[in-house]
Image (tube, helix red, strand yellow):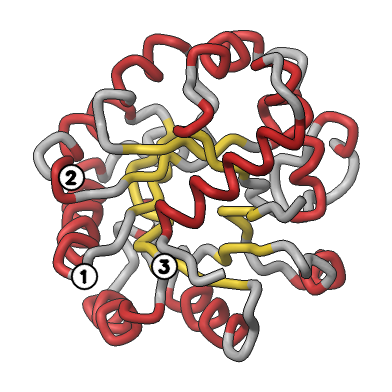
Amino acid sequence: MIFIDTHLHLDERIMDSINKLSPNYGIIIGTDKQSNEEAIKFCMGKNNFFYTLGIHPSEASNYSNSDLEFILDNVSTSVAIGEIGLDYYWKNDNKEEQKELFEKQIKIAIDNNKPIVIHNREATDDIYNILKKYDERLKIIFHCFTYGKHELELLLNLNCKFGIGGPITYPKNEELREAIKLLPIDRILLETDSPYLSPQEKRKELNTPLNIPLIARKIAEIKEITEEEVITKTTLNAIAWFDLKV
């Protein structure tokens, strides 16, 4: 079974595992000018890796116009704009700056017919209210969905899929597992967010894209289907949503 890790970050501590991902596939996520450049360089000449370009909300007070210009200059070879969004957990005194940056990148995605990869920390309502203005023109991925039924029911109104990763395995996340029971399999993408958010049985280790089967196994258990079905269907979801040439 071939799987696709739809969200991982380059980190020298896990490069050995990343380089062992073949014959499976991975999407390297950009979050700022440096990581965007590194993603492009890493993926060059590789058939099983793709990349996104974006400026993370944590950079909303620090980015420059040249950072956005870099995205525009390279957007044609990216598979999405992201990781973008709003984060009110780490910093909430610059909400307007975050929203402005978010909408600038949404417009880049629309103009270039690219999906967007959303980062959401304690900002669901604001993200929803922004996205619903553009929804008909966007394909949306809610990266690292960790919320419950209420948030799921709201976001399902959008043209979106949900990235599910290691947190689905954490004992405390019963509300998330209850939400996943309601989430159609055709709305699910697998991700690790490596090197972060290792599945429960690997919590003492850095996360790697090789842990995708552990996430698929937990989703299969929750939805009472086979692990093979989870991997097969989520792989097809990723190919279609990101328009991957695999």
Q: Disc 3 to disc 2, how far (Cα)? A: 27 Å
Q: Sequence-wise, which precedes: disc 1 or disc 2?
A: 2
Image position of 111 (left or right of 36): left
Secondary structure under tag 2 reads helix
Residue at the spot 56% in from the left edge and 81% down from the top edge: 38
Q: Is residue 67 above or below residue 14?
A: below
Residue at the spot 77% in from the left edge and 15% down from the top edge: 171
Q: Sequence-wise, which precedes: disc 3 or disc 1?
A: 3
Residue at the spot 57% in from the left edge and 54% down from the top edge: 7
Q: Disc 1 to disc 2, how far (Cα)? A: 25 Å
Q: Sequence-wise, which precedes: disc 3 or disc 2?
A: 3
* Three-letter code for the amino acid on which mark 1 is drawn: Asn
Say which residue label 1 marks: 112
Label 2 packing within 10 angstroms: few (<14), some (14-19), many (20+)? few
Say which residue label 3 marks: 79
Say which residue label 2 marks: 96
Image position of 103 (left or right of 56): left
Quadrant placement of the C terminus: bottom right
- Front residue (pair 97, 75): 75
Q: Nearer the viewer, mark 1 or mark 2?
A: 1
Q: Is residue 217 above or below residue 66?
A: above
Q: Quadrant of residue 11?
A: bottom right
Q: Is residue 58 visible?
A: no
Secondary structure under tag 1 reads loop
